[in-house]
Amino acid sequence: MKKEVEAWFRSFQDNLCAALQTCDGGAVFEEDLWQKEDGDGGGRTRIIQNGLVLEKGGVLFSAVTGILPEAAARALLLPDPQFFATGVSVVLHPTNPMVPIAHMNVRYFEAGNGEAWFGGGIDLTPIYVDTEQASTFHKALKSACDQHNPAYYPEFKKWADDYFYISHRRETRGVGGIFFDRLQATPDINIAERFAFVQSVANTFAPVYTNLMNQNRGKTYTPEQKQWQLLRRGRYVEFNLALDRGTRFGLETGGRTESILMSLPAMAAWQYNYTPADGSPEAKTLQFLKKDIDWINL
Amino acid sequence: MKKEVEAWFRSFQDNLCAALQTCDGGAVFEEDLWQKEDGDGGGRTRIIQNGLVLEKGGVLFSAVTGILPEAAARALLLPDPQFFATGVSVVLHPTNPMVPIAHMNVRYFEAGNGEAWFGGGIDLTPIYVDTEQASTFHKALKSACDQHNPAYYPEFKKWADDYFYISHRRETRGVGGIFFDRLQATPDINIAERFAFVQSVANTFAPVYTNLMNQNRGKTYTPEQKQWQLLRRGRYVEFNLALDRGTRFGLETGGRTESILMSLPAMAAWQYNYTPADGSPEAKTLQFLKKDIDWINL
């Protein structure tokens, strides 16, 4: 299984980079190959910078074997700390504040005792929430989920609301999406079907996001709207550095820092106690940064 | 004791704000008074923005009582989770990359079982390390320490090297300073003497830092030097959000977010895998971002 998943993730990275690069039209992905210091695997980090749409973004593939830190093995209830992990992670920061920030991740984990599972997710962080676009985005995710199990979308949408939550701000990171972890084989669902689901999720990303790029790339914006983007990116930085479990796990276990922190934007801002004016588009956006919004039946 | 410490910290905040504001000459501190939701204390947050030297900075006083989260009480080996804490925290981000970022904190903690201690520290983060200025800075800290105990400076300097260390970057945050925690009364040193030491440390900050402001405020800089400052501020953000224990404790225990995150700069940048050219002033600065540099006998 792991060879098959790893090979598919690798080719998925190729296809996604090609689609994003073609859509952007102004910059190409640069590749850095890296190996773990102990030689047990490595990755292909691909970064795009200063494109026509994408100011800074990364599409990362990795496949590593290793030994979990004791606390991590205990938290995962794994008796054997050996593991294999492979995945693709994507974060895209556009220049234009009218184009949302996007994130996706798909991953496969095999523990030393033979337990294996998939995890992943997609979420969207608009600087200005366009409710129609947010709804279309969620419908595409629901459709990918529904092909496999009608219970998936409601469950994984709620999981995203809870995961992409900036507790100290009492805000969600954006309009959410789906998030799932530790999807193992069950009596009803074998691991191949879990893999098929993850492939459906991954394959949703490029068409949905390039569509959002194209719909919004031509929109004009003011310096004030750009500043609002920088402040919202500040929140993105807060989430990734202070809260995101993947980032923290990577940094604490000696992952490749420049790959892990590709998720940070080219520039971000903080302004003490900034509150947008009542009724402004910025204030309206904040009203949508909440859990439990039904984006399908808005 | 706690009334006396709280009153001194409060007047220290007044004096420090006055000194910084006079030196800056272009902006004044704005004050926000806040109360804990349960009413057990609060604080005076004072923020300066867009001054002649200081782009964004805060001088925060707080005094609160509360109940430690179980994990925190256990980590501190405290049988009784009730506590009283008061302190002053300072972070100053200048506009000009030739003026270093500065941080200081002094704090007093009283546990429910009667244990009481002081903690604190000062550290300096130059964007370009001026070795003479860094040395003068350390000599001032050593002099404040030596008035009380010749063992303090070496011990607390090493503590700062270890604390202000960005492990995932293998860099110190800046040129260090001093850091100390849980300074309790001992058979040789009573709590009043601990307090006197903390007062000496606190009183060192204004003369040392206003001197650094004045020495560097008139220096010219290029857009490339400004960009280097934004990248170094990115590291500062990484430290504060991912590693700083005070920030994490504050955010996790429901502290006032806008006060805690006053430590973040107005703007910060990230650039994938940026490495300064060999022999450049930027590369030279990186060489000084290491532990165990003897700044006194440089």
Image (spheres, coloured by chain):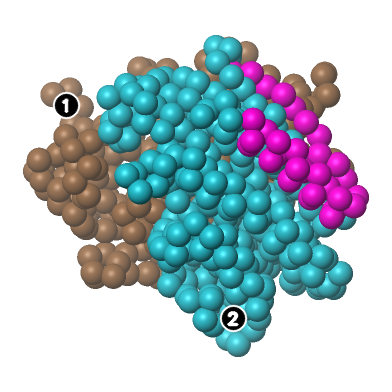
Chain colours: A cyan, B brown
Asked whether the beta carbons under mark 1 and mark 2 sit within 8 Å of each other, the answer is: no
- B162 sits to left or right of B184: right
Q: Secondary structure at mark 1?
A: loop
Mark 1 or 2: the one toward you: 2
Q: Main secondary structure of the magenta part?
A: helix
Is disc 2 surrounded by few (<14), some (14 to 19) or many (20+) residues within 10 Å?
some
- Residue wearing tag 1: B186
- A181 sits to left or right of A238: left
Give the residue type that dot 2 points to: Lys
Q: Separation of disc 1 and disc 2 at Cα?
A: 57 Å
Q: Is residue B165 visible?
A: no
Q: Which residues are magenta?
A: A7-36
Q: Residue at x 59, y 79 (%)?
A: A283
Magenta includes A26? yes
Image position of B42 with respect to B205: above or below: below
Instruction: Report in which chain the residue with disc 2 lies.
Output: A
User: Percent x, y for residue A181?
Assistant: 43, 46
Q: Is B171 in front, or is A12?
A: A12
Q: Residue at x 40, y 47 (%)?
A: A189
Q: Is B38 in front, or is A4?
A: A4
User: Percent x, y for residue B149?
Assistant: 33, 22
- Residue wearing tag 2: A284
Q: Residue at x 29, y 58 (%)?
A: B63
Q: Residue at x 73, y 59 (%)?
A: A207
Q: Is residue B42 visible?
A: yes
